[in-house]
Image (cartoon, helix red, strand yellow):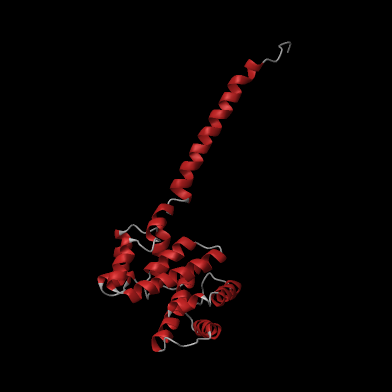
Amino acid sequence: SREKLAAEQFTIPAFNTVICCVLLLIILKAFSSSVIHKDQEKYMEINDPECPLLVQLKDLSKEEYYHAIHTAYLGDRIAKRLQLDDAAVKACGYYHRIGKLRGENTWENVSIICDEYHFPANTKRILKEYVDGSEKVVSKETIIVLFADCIVSSILYLFEKDPRAQLDYKKLIDTVFKKKLETDELWDNEISLAQLYEMKKIFVEEKLYYDFLR
């Protein structure tokens, strides 16, 4: 109680605090790399339009390649606005028809390619929902890919019939949404009506982009 305070008394506690902070930062960095962002490097690889797998698709069919590019672009835009897993949606936009590299676009063929290229688990799950006819479409990400693919397919089909056609994109998008919502395909899923409305709004906002599909 009669001891006078001196700087030396705080040296060891201060040193321990610094060491603990450094160790904590190292642990958090390792946790972020191995858990939170463990798939980031893989997504950077497979979401590159020049990825060898996409180059193979382009060599097989330029139509399929550009269809994948457009689907991935629209899916990525919507997923970011809805704050969903945009990297997984973009990957599924690129690879939702990748099974054609092995013949038919069946889930068996898609699954083999996913395993061969070590696709992230979430991407493989979404692709299974989308490609496998026995699976029910449940996740929001799968629904985004579904609508993006359908709208791109509709526009490409109409431009193939008449490259100079002046399309009413808003009307076309309204029709696609109406037909999808009239079926039981979107029953018992995770997406809300508000998110569907927002998705539709984003598709309409992209009308300037659709001219690139000619």
Q: Residue at x 31, y 63 (%)?
A: 53
Residue 131 screen position, x and y as percent: 37, 72
**Number of numbered markers:** 0
Residue 26 screen position, x and y as percent: 49, 37
Residue 78 screen position, x and y as percent: 53, 69
Residue 187 screen position, x and y as percent: 51, 77
Answer yes or no: is residue 74 visible. Answer: yes
Looking at the rendering, which quadrant does residue 66 occupy? Answer: bottom left
Q: Residue at x 39, y 55 (%)?
A: 42
Location of the C terminus by quadrant is: bottom left
Looking at the rendering, which quadrant does residue 193 occupy? Answer: bottom right
Q: Residue at x 46, y 61 (%)?
A: 87
Answer yes or no: is residue 139 visible. Answer: no
Residue at the far right: name it.
Answer: 2
Residue at the far top: name it.
Answer: 2
Residue 167 sits above or below residue 61 on the image: below
Location of the N terminus by quadrant is: top right
In front of the other: 142 or 155: 155
Residue at the far front: name it.
Answer: 164
